Image (spheres, helix red, strand yellow):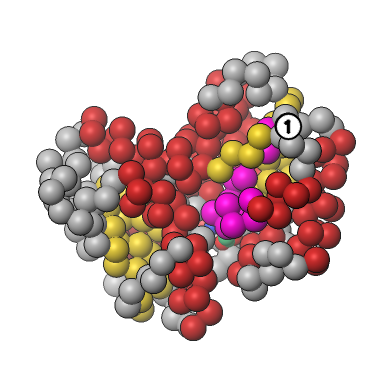
Amino acid sequence: MNPAPLGFFDSGVGGLTVVRAAQELLPAEDIIYLGDTARLPYGSKSPETIRQFADEDVRFLISRGVKAIVVACNTATAHALPILHQHYRIPIIGVIEAGVEAVLAEPKAERIGIIATRGTIRSHAYQHALAQRRTGLIIHGQPAPLLVPLVEENWIAHPATQQVLRTYLDPLVEKGIDTLMLACTHYPLLIPALSEILPTDVRLVDSATTCAEHLKQELTRLDLLAPADREGKLEIHLTDLSEEFENLARQFLRKSPGRIQRATLGN
Ligand code: DGL
């Protein structure tokens, strides 16, 4: 047992989709969430920059006494997870392995479409992880850089978003995908819009739930679970505060985010 908080970080508030899934599965855990809103987006930045940012995010969380860290950002997982594992002894869990496991949980999955930020697609982290675990897969990676700003504008049901989604997805549908991996923290909010566009037999996979399940397994294995007889608290820190982020945080969490604090990194 370990009552210390868990640390989560993302480039912004999108990683709160992972926090929400974790809170459902691990209600007793205290969570410290860091969103690097001052330097958002990560998805268009170089691997070197993301590794530096991720390192600073991890240091911030370690300085707050967390017992394990979840990289609740696909781009940061894709570029920085291996190097974070080399540099830190604290358990650090990313979202990609969980996403890949969720895709392959369906034995018939064969033609996989992946939508993500440009950085995640270019890293080939998902493509490699999938191909390593199952041979014969046909994998199509589609960068979808306009989706994050559309979600952040709350244009979820807007015709412009439908148009953009069709532009990204039509080529994948033409290639006959049977599974679509939503490889970005923001995309779970687009599931209703995606369901309208995609053929009904295309399976949608998002990594938030599987990541929470993976986290629970790891905490159990390492004997790090918090005592069950309590209600966990959530503390949100952002590197830039604005009303928009507060509203977005509410949307991603589907409840009040409470008081959000301003974080300063690099101290
Ligand atoms: N959190 C990022 C991800 O999951 C999306 C937002 C960004 O580009 O920073 O890839």
Work out whether 155 lies above or below 74: below
**Residue at 44% from the left image edge and 81% from the top image edge:** 241
Where's residue 23, x and y in %?
33, 52
Name the quarter showing ligand 1. Answer: bottom right
Magenta range is 179-191
User: Residue 163's image quarter?
Assistant: bottom right
Q: Which residue is mark 1?
A: 201
Tell me which amino acid carries mark 1. Asp
Q: Nearer the viewer, residue 198 or 13?
A: 198
Q: Is residue 107 left or right of residue 18?
A: right
Q: Is residue 186 left or right of residue 2?
A: right
**Residue at 78% from the left image edge and 38% from the top image edge:** 199
- Which quadrant of the figure contains the C terminus? bottom left
**Residue at 51% from the left image edge and 29% from the top image edge:** 101
- Most extreme residue toward the bottom is 243
Where's residue 223, x and y in %?
17, 35
Q: In the image, is residue 100 part of the stretch drawn in magenta?
A: no
Q: Nearer the viewer, residue 28 or 262?
A: 28
